[in-house]
Amino acid sequence: MLFLLPPSETKLDGGSAGSRLDVTGLSFGALEAPRRASLSLLHEMTRDDVAAARALRLGPTQAHEIERNRVVSSSPTMPALARYTGVLFDPLDVSSLDAASWRWAQRHVVVHSALFGLVRAADEIPAYRLSHDSKVGGTTLKKVWRAPVSGVLAGLDEPVVDLRSEGYVGLGPAGDGSTYVRVVSDAGDRRRALNHFNKKSKGLFVRALLTDRPDLADVHDLADWARGRGFVIEPGLETVLVAESVLDAA
């Protein structure tokens, strides 16, 4: 079973000394061509600081993000799951993961990057700034990624649990064999979608998976495991993760 996460706008700087981006070393080799196309568009964007700031919606204090993009091919790398920070990724506490958890993460956790497409947890990537709705070189990332990502996901021989935001689903729908998870707040007979706690709930949920490393065949196995952890997963046409249960179990 594969758990598909959105990326984060915020990322750590730095990486392993002497390392640099190796596009051919990333998982899902079928995405090499769109990765190179995306990198080319990003490099083209950095030629004009004003245009880059506008395309990335950056304020005056975020000029360093343009420089990150300018040196993205030569800057140091670190595992994708460690690179991203923020509300979803901070609960993963990757610095505390042992070797077994990292192996499970590399096998079962994938992040959908706006720049690199699908990357596995331990794939080495540099810091960058790009969003699903960024316009680069007069085109959109949907044109770069939608068909290739959908093709890769459709070709997987295992269930996909889609925890992405709708914006990243638009860069490559997972298809009929996937389970899209929506996080809701349960207020009696009325449920509502969440924003901030949506991300935190997903982070806490994935952290529990990394800790337990369960063997899961389908979404019903996932729901059974979740129940034992105090989480509420309701499989259906649109699988629901009840936020309060996740937060209470943390």
Image (spheres, rainbow, N blue to C red):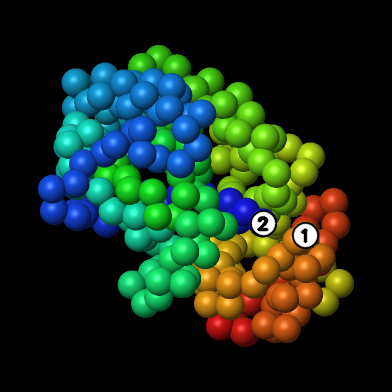
Q: Inspect the image, locate mark 1, and give the three-letter code of the amino acid beneath it.
A: Asp
Where is residue 75 drawn, in percent x and y?
18, 42
In the picture, measured across the screen, residue 49 lies left or right of residue 115, that is left
Q: Is residue 185 visible?
A: no
Q: Nearer the viewer, residue 179 or 247?
A: 179
Q: CA distance from mark 1 to mark 2?
A: 7 Å
**Helix, strand or loop for disc 2:** loop
Quarter the C terminus occupies = bottom right
Secondary structure type for disc 1: loop
The label on residue 94 is: none
The residue to which callout 2 is attached is 1
- On the image, which quarter does residue 84 sit in? bottom left
Q: Nearer the viewer, residue 129 or 107?
A: 107
Locate the N terminus by quadrant: bottom right
Q: Can you say whether 212 is above or below 146 in the image?
A: below
- In the image: residue 47, left or right of residue 200: left
Tell me what residue is drawn at x 60 percent, y 56 percent: 3
Residue 17 position within the rendered picture, expressed as x and y whole percent measured from the top left: 13, 53
- The answer to whether residue 149 shows anywhere in this view is yes
Disc on res. 218: 1
How crowded pointer 2 is (Cα within 10 Å; few <14, some 14-19, many 20+) is rated as many
Q: Position of residue 120 (x, y in %)?
A: 47, 50
Q: Residues within 10 Å of mark 1 (few under 14, many from 20)?
A: some
> Outermost residue, left direction?
18
Is 100 on the left or on the right of 168, as rendered?
left
Q: Contact (CB < 8 A) between labels 1 and 2?
A: yes
**Residue extending farthest top:** 138
Q: How many marks?
A: 2
Name the residue at 77% across, 60% down: 218
Report the residue at 70% width, 44% height from top.
157
Q: Residue at (70%, 49%) from the top-left corner?
A: 158
Kind of residue indicated by mark 2:
Met
